[in-house]
């Protein structure tokens, strides 16, 4: 079932009066329960596409539909709050908070239905991702890179969103941890019916994906 | 994790930033509070003094206006002050009668006498004038039986009685004098006393010569004692207050009509004498007993003073006269305090402005340090208004803590600044003369009594005002600094 539909999506950056298109007439439908990777060279528009899918940027041309409704119907904040969860390369956790608190912040912001016992849910979620209770109560700055990325994934999941977007999520972790993170993403897609879209350079990750989308000259080539 | 908890977590975990903000608010709050405390203390002093004073308004010459006129006057120009008349008084009564409890004025005439001996105050520096020499007294009229000095409690009858309305109306030869003066001259209430009034002049050699003697016969109907005046300086010797008391001991109270008759008789003696002496016609303007004499209005209530003055001034329509209120007198005497208040009021506004500026810069720099955190909140879909609210909660919470510490310190700083400014007054407060009240009623306050009332202290009002001001300042600074949040783009910050 299609959860995000991209129609004739184009995006450009302005160089004086010249429009330099990084995405041109992209059309695609992302489905729940699948693990997607988007590959492409630097400057190919991967991050731009991810930022548009994650409502971090406004659509210039074309449309993006969430569950059949065009993005224009929502405000970008609301999409970020209730539809998508973002995982960044550099984790982007609030440094003076514990792992648990970082997860709880996201749970407080979303308007999605969350069980009342948020703290327990957050502990369980962190535990599911390999962060024990004692680690969950530590400041995130006291955790390793891999652990911080797990906290970031937990935060994205905690809001009960259907779409997980990740920008180079294994860029700052060792190979072993990267492998573990990929396993988590696959589990989320296959066992928890999430739509997981990962932007990466890594062919290893791409090899694990259900669908590999490669951006060339502003558009996709698709390998399923 | 609620907004409040997020804010508290930020305050407690970002200790250095919280401490910096706390110190800045403490310092700025100290300055702000001390200026506020002094300004409010000056206002409080004024209110407490004015509250205690009777609702008295004097109608007196506008000396500033006269001085201005004389400075601009051509030498040849003749000018006669448009003295108030009894018609003016009637108009004032018609316009503001509802507010007037009673009013009084005093016709005054000087008396030179050898037969009456002044009361000797026995103070160092006091010039009584020796026996056999001419002594100076003042015949002062009153307009009603409960005249201003009695009505305001500045004098009391210790023996005998006051004037009857009939005696005042008829200008009867009855007299009230001070108990001290009566004892000095062995007068008793009920005595008929005769005072020789001497009309004198000086020869070319500077010797005093008597031109004519008039015998004034009075019935002494009562004896007065005067309220003790607050002393401006605590030194022994003849003070300004002693001088005022000496004047009162030399004052013989009778009715205005008697004084006016006596003045007309005096003019009938002295005018021909001077005409003969100088060989020229003296001014034959009609005698106006109100000329140069202040009128004292005692009102029903202090709240009605401004309404009365407004109506009475319009009814009088004479720019050379003005109504002087207790507040006007207070302003003259308390000028050093009031000018300090003026300076500190400006200082307060400047401090508030500076506080907004400094806090904005500090908070803006804090926001830049938290750029990534703001980006994370935005990426999680948090509303910008909520992020701003969190920042406001944080700064207000730390700010209020700093403000509370400032409340303790501000008291000492305020006392220090206040003492420093008060010990160096810009004008000599004791040099201020309340001209309108000199002969009508006693001045109820001087600079020292004002200073005694003046006390820098915390009041509920000052604390509440301070907290409101500091909170508003912090919120204003945070809102300005929060422009940073409005401009924040999560993509640019995080991706």
Image (tube, coloured by chain):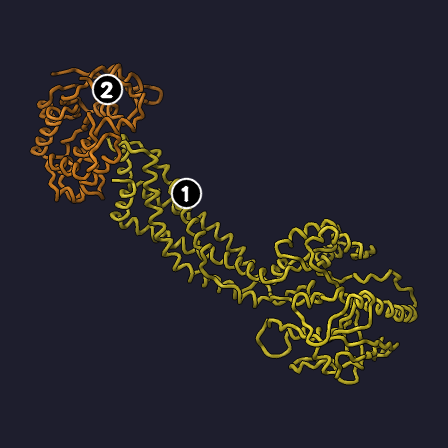
Chain colours: A orange, B yellow
Is label 2 in a helix, a strand or a loop? loop
Q: Residue furthest left?
A: A176
| Residue at figure coordinates x 63%, y 58% from the top left | B328
User: Dot 1, how many residues are within 10 Å of its Cα: few (below 14), some (14-19), or many (20+)?
Assistant: some
Write down the chain letter for disc 1: B
**Left or right position of B8 against B441:** left
| Residue at figure coordinates x 39%, y 60% from the top left | B409
- Where does residue B186 sit, x and y in percent of width and height? 75, 84
- Where does residue B126 sit, x and y in percent of width and height? 68, 80
Give the quadrant of the C terminus of chain A: top left
Res. B176 visible in picture: yes
Is label 1 in a helix, a strand or a loop? helix
Whole-angstrom CA distance, mark 1 to mark 2, is: 42 Å
| Residue corresponding to mark 1 | B476
Write down the chain letter for disc 2: A
Q: Residue furthest bottom?
A: B131
| Residue at figure coordinates x 32%, y 36% from the top left | B386
| Residue corresponding to mark 2 | A67
Q: Is residue B34 above or below residue B174?
A: above
Q: Number of marks in the image?
A: 2
Front residue (pair A105, B203): A105
Q: Is residue B264 above or below residue B73?
A: below
Front residue (pair A89, B313): B313
Picture quadrant where residue B493 is located: top left
- Where does residue B42 sit, x and y in percent of width and height? 53, 59
* Marking on residue B352: none
User: Dot 2, how many residues are within 10 Å of its Cα: few (below 14), some (14-19), or many (20+)?
Assistant: some
| Residue at figure coordinates x 42%, y 62% from the top left | B412
Label 1 vs label 2, nearer the camera: 2
Q: Are marks 1 and 2 on the same chain?
A: no
Picture quadrant where residue B489 is located: top left
């Amino acid at each position: 079932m299609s959860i995000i539909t991209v129609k004739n999506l184009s995006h450009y950056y302005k160089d004086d009066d010249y429009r330099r298109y990084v995405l041109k007439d992209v059309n695609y439908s992302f489905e729940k329960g699948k693990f997607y990777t988007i590959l492409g060279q630097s400057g190919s528009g991967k991050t731009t596409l991810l930022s548009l899918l994650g409502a971090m940027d406004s659509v210039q041309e074309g449309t993006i539909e969430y569950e059949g409704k065009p993005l224009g119907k929502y405000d970008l904040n609301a999409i970020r709050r209730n539809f998508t969860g973002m995982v960044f390369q550099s984790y982007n956790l609030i440094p003076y908070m514990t792992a648990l608190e970082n997860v709880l912040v996201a749970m407080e912001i979303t308007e999605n239905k969350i069980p009342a016992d948020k703290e327990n849910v957050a502990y369980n979620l962190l535990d599911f991702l390999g962060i024990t209770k004692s680690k969950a109560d530590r400041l995130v700055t006291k955790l390793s890179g891999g652990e911080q990325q797990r906290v970031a994934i937990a935060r994205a999941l905690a809001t009960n969103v259907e779409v997980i977007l990740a920008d180079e999520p294994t860029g700052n972790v060792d190979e072993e941890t990267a492998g573990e993170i990929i396993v988590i993403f696959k589990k989320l897609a296959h066992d928890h019916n999430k739509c997981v879209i990962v932007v990466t350079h890594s062919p290893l990750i791409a090899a694990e994906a259900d669908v590999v989308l490669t951006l060339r000259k502003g558009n996709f080539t698709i390998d399923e | 994790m609620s907004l409040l908890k997020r804010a508290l977590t930020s305050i407690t975990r970002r200790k250095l930033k919280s401490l910096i903000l706390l110190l800045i608010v403490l310092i700025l709050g100290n300055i702000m509070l001390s200026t506020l405390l002094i300004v409010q203390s000056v206002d409080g002093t004024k209110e407490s003094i004015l509250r205690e004073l009777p609702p008295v308004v004097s109608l007196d010459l506008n000396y500033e206006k006269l001085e201005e006129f004389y400075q601009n006057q051509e030498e040849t120009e003749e000018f006669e002050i448009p003295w108030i008349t009894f018609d003016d008084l009637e108009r004032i009564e018609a316009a503001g009668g509802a507010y007037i409890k009673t009013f009084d004025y005093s016709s005054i005439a000087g008396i030179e006498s050898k037969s009456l001996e002044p009361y000797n105050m026995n103070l160092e520096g006091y010039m009584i004038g020796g026996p056999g020499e001419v002594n100076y007294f003042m015949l002062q009229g009153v307009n009603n039986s409960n005249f201003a000095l009695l009505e305001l409690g500045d004098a009391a009858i210790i023996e005998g009685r006051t004037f009857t309305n009939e005696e005042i109306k008829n200008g009867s030869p009855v007299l009230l004098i001070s108990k001290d003066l009566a004892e000095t001259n062995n007068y008793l209430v009920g005595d008929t006393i005769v005072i020789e009034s001497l009309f004198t002049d000086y020869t070319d050699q500077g010797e005093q010569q008597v031109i004519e003697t008039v015998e004034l016969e009075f019935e002494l109907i009562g004896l007065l004692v005067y309220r003790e005046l607050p002393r401006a300086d605590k030194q022994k010797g003849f003070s300004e207050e002693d001088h005022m008391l000496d004047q009162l001991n030399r004052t013989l109270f009778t009715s205005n009509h008697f004084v006016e008759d006596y003045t007309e008789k005096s003019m009938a003696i002295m005018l021909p004498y001077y005409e003969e002496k100088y060989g020229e016609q003296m001014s034959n303007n009609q005698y106006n007993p109100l000329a140069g004499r202040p009128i004292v209005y005692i009102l029903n209530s202090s709240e009605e003073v401004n309404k009365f003055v407004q109506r009475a001034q319009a009814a009088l329509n004479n720019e050379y006269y003005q109504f002087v209120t207790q507040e006007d007198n207070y302003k003259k005497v308390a000028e050093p305090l009031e000018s300090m208040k003026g300076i500190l009021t400006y200082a307060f506004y400047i401090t508030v402005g500076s506080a907004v500026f400094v806090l904005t810069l500090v908070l803006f720099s804090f926001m830049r340090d938290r750029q990534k955190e703001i980006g994370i909140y935005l990426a999680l879909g948090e509303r910008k208004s909520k992020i701003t609210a969190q920042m406001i909660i944080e700064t207000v919470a730390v700010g209020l803590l700093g403000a509370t510490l400032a409340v303790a310190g501000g008291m000492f700083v305020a006392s220090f600044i206040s003492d420093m400014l008060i010990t160096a007054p810009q004008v000599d407060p004791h040099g201020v003369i309340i001209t309108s009240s000199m002969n009508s009623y006693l001045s109820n306050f001087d600079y020292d009594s004002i200073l005694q009332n003046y006390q820098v202290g915390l009041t509920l009002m000052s604390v509440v005002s301070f907290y409101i001001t500091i909170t508003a300042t912090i919120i204003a600074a945070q809102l300005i600094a929060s422009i940073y949040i409005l401009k924040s783009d999560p993509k640019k910050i995080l991706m």
